Amino acid sequence: MTDRKLRSARWFETQDLRGFGHRSRIMQMGYAPEDWSGRPVIAILNTWSDINPCHAHFKTRVEDVKRGVLQAGGFPIELPALSLSENFVKPTTMLYRNLLAMETEELLRSHPVDGAVLMGGCDKTTPGLLLGATSMDLPAIYVPAGPMLRGNWRGETLGSGSDAWKYWDEKRAGNISDQDWTGVEAGIARSYGHCMTMGTASTMTGTTEALGMTLSGASSIPAADSNHIRMCAAAGRRIVGMVESDLRPSRILTRASFENAITVAMAMGCSTNAIIHLIAQARRAKIDIGLGDFDRLSRKIPVIANIRPSGERYLMEDFYYAGGLRALMQRLSDHLDLGARTVSGATLGEDIAGAEVYDDDVIRPLDNPLYAEGALAVLKGNLAPDGCVIKPSACAPKFLKHRGPALVFDSYAEMKDRIDDPELEVTEDTVLVMRGAGPQGGPGMPEWGMIPIPAKLLKQGVRDMLRISDARMSGTSYGACILHVAPESHIGGPLALIRTGDIVSVDVPARRIDMEVSDAELADRKAAWSPPQPRFERGYGWVFTRHILQADKGCDLDFLESSHGANPGEPAI
Ligand code: FES
Ligand code: MG
């Protein structure tokens, strides 16, 4: 099948006691030499589990991938991997993204594998699988789970995340009944597939396609569409060809492909989580992408995907019918490097040739965008020397330039306890500050960054306030929330030193965030600061705490970065 010696041949073709062991044990499962001999072994990393609704269909889709692998002459083996259900994993899946990345790398390293199909979609599974596959650098193709169908309640379209909050407020306000609420509960997630708003899942599967790591158009196909089944089989067929031509991630992932991914993220009105994941992915690929690249591209790329929560009406299903990501990229052609290579073996330009937009309201023309610039902005100053992030398109314009006194909460628990206190000294000009929610402090940087508006102000009609934290926020959230403050408070970043009453000034056009406190005073406060108790004393959490990098570096574990040391090479067998 190929002139190159397959990696898996080291297991299956050696005429020694080890080779005997591998062959006799694969025969134990009913396979004959015709099944494996001379055929690339394709690992299918499946993040299915009984408690991940976003991947429920992977139980059968994996059979479609296998069908494709067999058709093309490969030998498929399914390897289950950490499922990371965003809904059920506590305290946050972000704590475990790197565990999936490690598992992916080691599954591929330790098994007789020549190429890999990566099956994921729910938020952290996409970066987790890609980080590991990039480090291992065997030919790999990504199979995105696809978005679930639009939610529906009494003929009303419901979107993941965003509408849960909206109707929860209606219920608290007494506008809908318990029975209505149960109806919303049953209607908001009505098929398998990942969240169908432009949350982290749709953002990351879209950027993965823009990077060139999926078949063209794959990320937009709804999970329940039969095109999704055919895409799975096609990916199975394609990976065999990729092994034959040795098309590894290192030949696909370049600075140009990451700039394409960031450009597409901006045009989609991406989740802020994209920043952390793409920086981590780029660093694994030995490409120095940082916050500055996001800020630079954000200034020139308009938001043209009219999908909630940036847009008002549409969801991923509408995006697919309007032409999907291929059509969006066709529209962005002038901003993309169309010469970038993809898993197809062709260029991005060839992959998207002929793609058309079928609905100009869903995928807007560049001269009629949703927002002319700025899916996000990166701010720096004495409160965040290594940077922090805001989504200007999601906040009330008056907060883009704001000066006000800080009201500081030391932790999420304290904030939750006090935020609705009628005695809370707060006005709409107050800047709500929460610390202890970063990569180490959270731990795992939970999505707590959309600090609730104090009940007292809600009653006065206030709907947005400036909020600052070292947390992340869900891709379906909104408001004047400044996130990812680095370095975080838990390790003594300046966020640990700010006090209630200090004046905070934020200037988004100038990209500044400062507290009006003198350097001398900050030095005194720092000298008096003592580090909080470590969160974990054993297990994965202990490793995580010791080795997690800050948000501006992508929150990878330092020893997993490509710069950490020599590649261990192939296992002895
Ligand atoms: Fe899986 Fe939203 S819960 S993508
Ligand atoms: Mg999410």
Image (cartoon, rainbow, N blue to C red):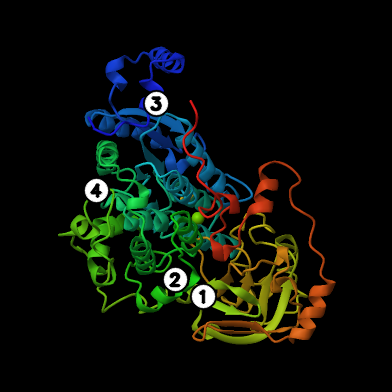
**SS at badge 1:** strand
Q: CA distance from mark 4 to mark 2?
A: 27 Å
Amino acid, disc 2: Phe
Mark 4 lies on residue:
344
Task: Identify the mark nearer the N-term, 3 or 4.
Answer: 3
Q: CA distance from mark 3 to mark 4?
A: 28 Å
Q: CA distance from mark 2 to mark 1?
A: 8 Å
Task: Identify the mark nearer the N-term, 4 or 2.
Answer: 2
Residue 12, picture quadrant: top left
Identify the disc placed on residue 378. Answer: 1
Which-is-in-front pick, marks 3 and 1?
Answer: 3
* Up/down of 360 relative to 348, above or below: below
Q: Are marks 3 and 1 in contact (CB under 8 Å)?
A: no
Residue 452, picture quadrant: bottom right
Which-is-in-front pick, marks 3 and 2?
Answer: 3
Task: Identify the mark nearer the N-term, 2 or 1.
Answer: 2
Identify the disc placed on residue 10. Answer: 3
Residue 74 as seen in the image, left or right of residue 494:
left
Whole-percent x, y for residue 330 in the image: 22, 65
Whole-percent x, y for residue 382 in the image: 65, 80
Residue 533 as seen in the image, left or right of residue 329:
right
Which-is-in-front pick, marks 3 and 4?
Answer: 3
Task: Identify the mark nearer the N-term, 3 or 1.
Answer: 3
Badge 2 crowding class, 10 Å Cα cut-off, few under 14, some 14 to 19, many 20 or more, is many
Q: Residue at x 35, y 72 (%)?
A: 303
Task: Identify the mark nearer the N-term, 1 or 4.
Answer: 4
Badge 4 crowding class, 10 Å Cα cut-off, few under 14, some 14 to 19, many 20 or more, is many
**SS at badge 2:** helix
Q: CA distance from mark 1 to mark 4?
A: 34 Å
Identify the disc placed on residue 294. Answer: 2
Residue 483 as seen in the image, left or right of residue 24:
right
Q: Are marks 4 and 2 in contact (CB under 8 Å)?
A: no
